[in-house]
Amino acid sequence: MPIHTLEITNVRNLQRAKLQCSLQSNLIIGPNGSGKTSLLESITILSQGKSFRNSQKKSIISEGNNNLTIAALLDDEFCNQSIQGIRVGISKFANGKTLAKIASEKVQRISEITSLLPVCVIEPNSTEIVEGSPALRRQVLDWGVFHVEHDFVKHWRVFSSALKQRNALLKNKNCDVNQLRYWNEVLAPAAEQIAQLRRLYFSDFEGELKSSLRYFFNDDSVSVKVLDGWDSSMSFLECLNRNIEKDKRYGFTSDGPHKADFEIRSNGYLAKDYLSRGQKKLAVYAIRLAQVAHYQKKCSKRVSLLLDDLPSELDKGNCEKVCKELQRLECQVFITSIDTSNLNNMIIDTLSPKLFHVKHGTVTA
Ligand SMILES: Nc1ncnc2c1ncn2[C@@H]1O[C@H](COP(=O)(O)OP(=O)(O)O)[C@@H](O)[C@H]1O
Ligand SMILES: [Mg+2]
């Protein structure tokens, strides 16, 4: 559900900001250090309970304060400026506590807000998705699986708590093999379900992904594949039982869905070794925008897409391609850009966004 109004209190240098958002495109312009990324960070914290920036939680709260609050009125109609909507809010405290609410009712899990306000972020560090370890690619894959396959969270919770128990046992080199075998039995069915749901999601999403990659790269050179995280020629139970000695040596569970990958290749080579930095960014845009398109079609809900520093990421032609795709997707979008970027006019011409200016933490429309 797109954001109708957004209120931010004490997020970094944004001590108080209130925005009446466009349900389509919003362009946030300001100089370096003015608070643009903090604004996108606020939307992510509201949706997911955490920031996309890897910083200490405490450092997100404005200096000298004990808590931050982000609240929004979500629009409940597809592309309709209705005044009815759902209020969601989150407060985070310096002691680490979080309080989240939907329509004034306390919620137990942030994922309830995530489902109402699905957010997808592309920021300058997103090239790490291509260059970095599988963990980030798994996050991208699981963004889609979480939003589309609703049993995923349930199986993931069972798996990760059993994994913790198994790994705790493995810390002791002389651990009891029977106990390990017990946890293998708990882990295996959850792991098979996770892998199955990832495959299911991917087979449904693949068509959208292929056409997006073709649109951005003008050919079929870039391809993506899901790897389960273990040798799929055997069941996961068999794999765990075979790995017992190896895992005892390592001190942790070496294979499993926690090691899955969303492998990106270009002309057969791993994309991290083959694509230029600009092309890596383009691959990230192609994958994430395809996920948004697929989700919106599948679930008939809109995503809020957050694009941090869009013009600094891409050349003019590709920036234009992204804008045209955004127009087609009809998702809600928040784009940030520095005020001197010569691509701002192109974004304004293509998307007719609502404009916001940020200066020293003050946001004006
Ligand atoms: N906890 C905090 N309290 C107050 N200001 C902060 C805090 N953390 C970061 N800042 C400041 O917030 C400003 C906004 O940062 P940012 O949103 O990244 O700017 P932009 O994306 O516009 O370049 C920076 O000048 C930064 O120094
Ligand atoms: Mg920034």
Image (cartoon, helix red, strand yellow):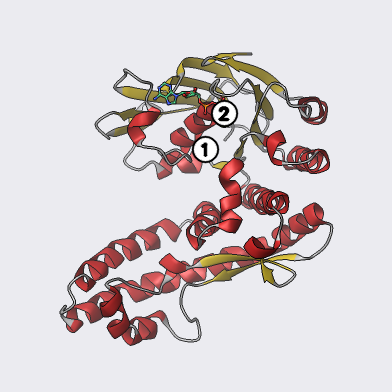
What residue is shown with label 1? 117
Q: Are marks 2 and 1 in contact (CB under 8 Å)?
A: yes
Ligand 2 visible in quadrant: top right
Q: Nearer the viewer, residue 82 or 122?
A: 122
Q: State whether residue 1 is above or below residue 348.
A: below
Q: Type of residue at label 1?
A: Leu
Q: State whether residue 92 is above or below residue 135.
A: above
Q: Type of residue at label 2?
A: Ile
Question: Percent x, y for residue 252?
Answer: 30, 71
Q: Residue at x 48, y 20 (%)?
A: 7
Question: Percent x, y for residue 121?
Answer: 57, 41
Question: Percent x, y for residue 365?
Answer: 64, 13
Picture quadrant where residue 37 is located: top right
Q: Is residue 338 left or right of residue 52?
A: right
The earlier-in-sequence mark between 2 and 1 is 2
Q: Is residue 228 left or right of residue 159?
A: right
